[in-house]
Image: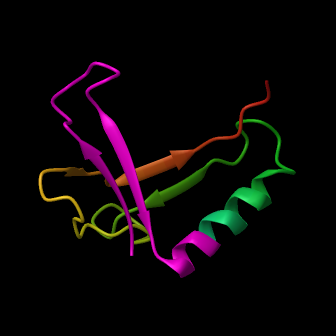
């Protein structure tokens, strides 16, 4: 199970909103491998995009771990060069 959940989504202030990532062992290995593969990419060239089944590839679960959290349906990770 790999879910991305936003706690207190109604809060727009920096202190009020928290993003939680919950990953099983296989999901953690997939994420690490995907991030490692991004090392050789040009900045902003190939973002890692994960979706729930509702939105796409089904890499993320819509099963909640935190009852009052909002499920994120898409996670995009982009390499920046700084």
> As rendered, which of 79 and 56 lies closer to the eye?
79
Residue 71 inside the magenta-drawn segment: no
- On screen, residue 41 versus residue 69, left or right, reads right
- On screen, residue 53 versus residue 32, left or right, reads left
Identify the residue shown where x is 72% and y is 32%.
Answer: 80
- On screen, residue 23 versus residue 42, left or right, reads left
Label tally: 0
Report the span colored magenta: 1-29
Q: Position of residue 63 (x, y in %)?
A: 23, 70
Quarter-wise, where is residue 18 in the image?
top left
Quadrant containing the C terminus is top right
Q: Position of residue 4 (x, y in %)?
A: 36, 55
Identify the residue shown where x is 63% and y is 74%.
Answer: 29
Quarter-wise, where is residue 13 in the image?
top left
Q: Position of residue 65 (x, y in %)?
A: 24, 65
Residue lying farthest front? 15
> As rendered, which of 24 and 31 lies closer to the eye?
24
């Amino acid at each position: 199970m790999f879910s991305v959940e936003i706690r207190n989504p109604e809060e727009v202030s920096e202190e009020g909103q928290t993003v939680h990532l919950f990953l099983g062992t296989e999901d953690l290995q997939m994420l690490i491998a995907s991030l490692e593969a991004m090392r050789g990419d040009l900045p902003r060239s190939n973002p890692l995009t994960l979706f729930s089944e509702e939105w796409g590839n089904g890499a993320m679960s819509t099963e909640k771990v935190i009852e009052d959290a909002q499920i994120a349906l898409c996670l995009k990770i982009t390499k920046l060069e700084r």
